[in-house]
Amino acid sequence: MPVAEKILILDYGSQFTQLIARRVRELGVYGEIYAHDCSKERIAEFAPAGIILSGGPQSVLAADAPAMNEAIFELGVPILGLCYGMQLLTQYGGGQVVAEGGCEYGNASVRITQSPQSPCPLFADIETDTLQVWMSHGDHVQQLAAGYEVVARSNDDADGVIAAIADVKRRYYGLQFHPEVAHTEHGSHLLENFVRRICTLRATWTMPNFIKQAVTDITEKVGDAHVLLALSGGVDSAVTAALLHRAIGQQLVCVLVDNGLLRRGEVESVRSVFEQQFGIKLIVIDAAERFYQELAGIVDSEEKRRRIGHLFIKVFEEQATNLGEQIQWLGQGTIYPDVVESGKVGNSKATIKTHHNVGGLPEHLNLHLIEPLRDLFKDEVRRLGEELGLAHTLMWRHPFPGPGLAVRVLGEVTAARVATVRQADDIFLTEMQASGAYEQTAQAFAVLLPVQSVGVMGDERTYEDVIALRAVTSSDFMTADWARLNNDLLARVSSRIINEVAGVNRVVYDISSKPPATIEWE
Ligand code: XMP
């Protein structure tokens, strides 16, 4: 992304590295993550106005510890080392890092010890002497490298572990704790002091600026060629469509594969937003029957996923082939966390894990790949979408899995069973939205169980399906808690499902957290 004022974050493997980039961007400054061992040329090309060294799981004392990337000192820009990063600055500068006595994990208290005569700009305008911070380290700095002074220590005594160091003249700083973590008091303020005061960067990273730049980039790249994009109704593909359309208008062709596994009203709503509101060229392929045939007799969830994935690619490729030479580019809604998680940051030697979204879908179609959201975090994608005119409700929808309702129909997937779960799901979501509970949960849906149970309706004994309701709160979907939904809401949903959905006589509510349960049932 060609922005002038930016921060480079060198990743030493911390679980918080992405958070550092997010915090920097929340301050209105573009920050990008590169692998710690990326080349001198890449760093020079990126031309950062400041550098942050992340924490990391290893010890700087280990023989195979990731080393300092010396190229950063050639730029003459401010450097902030966090945890491992601070220890690396110390070790590289000739100071001493030791392993004994001083491990701190979790919440800790640090005291700012800067002298009033030479206040440290990192702590400017922080009107307290003690901070509650998030620590996670085994080693610590014992002896400073030349040029540095101690500006904060853990605990109240003069021998507390060194918690912050500064070389104000060269503009090198280190924090033993993690300012990027929400548990650290004034953490954002510390980062703001580094980015704004020390690196003197302005807040130029805004969505309107991003759009201007992206439109120029896309137009230059694509010229008068045509781009094909698979729309799913999800946030990332929707925003990709809106952005590409802003740049190249009718040269964009969107394809929605209706696999028969979508939620109620999904196809109509995609049509109404993209065709009617935006005037985007949209091809809807009704492939429901093909998907049901592909899933006939399959009960294993991974096999369902595999078959759905393969058939999707096949249907999509057929469409691309039909469009023939008209199309030269394939659009994809890859976002920054996908890129980071696939290890494709900077030019790292190590690949952490591969990601299905990165690297291109059907390679043999011979299309160039365009991924205009590659640099954006999810919350930025949502803000971008709203800036492009996509509705707030669409941008803040709960996520929906690629294999759709198939993984919410436990046991065999048939058109009839999908219809049952779709209707129950629609009732649940409608009531959640009406009560305001939808916005307070991260995900909510209905699941059709592969068992039947006894009931009584009128004077008749019934033996019918069971619907499970699942609603969770979660900030990252890695962990989740079951949502404490209002009892009256649950009662209303249960009664509506049993009365309105044919063949269902029982509704249960899932009260499992993740872990050990997952959010989806399969
Ligand atoms: P779990 O069930 O693993 O889900 O706790 C975490 C998040 O991932 C979504 N999910 C999927 N998304 N394809 C997707 O695109 C899948 O196969 C898939 N499985 C789970 C799930 O809905 C939740 O948001």
Image: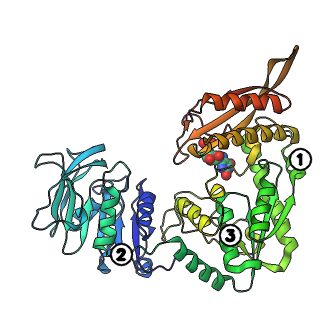
How far apart marks 3 and 1 lie (CA) works out to: 33 Å
Locate residue 194, reporting x and y percent. Answer: 30, 67
Q: Residues within 10 Å of mark 3 (few under 14, many from 20)?
A: many
Q: Report the side of 353 relative to 168 (left or right).
A: right
Three-letter code, disc 1: Gln
First-in-chain label (2 vs 3):
2
Q: Under 8 Å from ligand 1: the CB of mark 2? A: no
Q: Report the side of 149 relative to 189 (left or right).
A: left
Q: Which mark is residue 293?
A: 1
* Residue named by callout 2: 201
* Residue named by callout 3: 242
Q: Under 8 Å from ligand 1: the CB of mark 1? A: no
First-in-chain label (3 vs 1):
3
Q: Tell me which residue sits at (29%, 79%) in the image.
A: 76
Label 3: element kind? helix
Label 2: element kind? loop
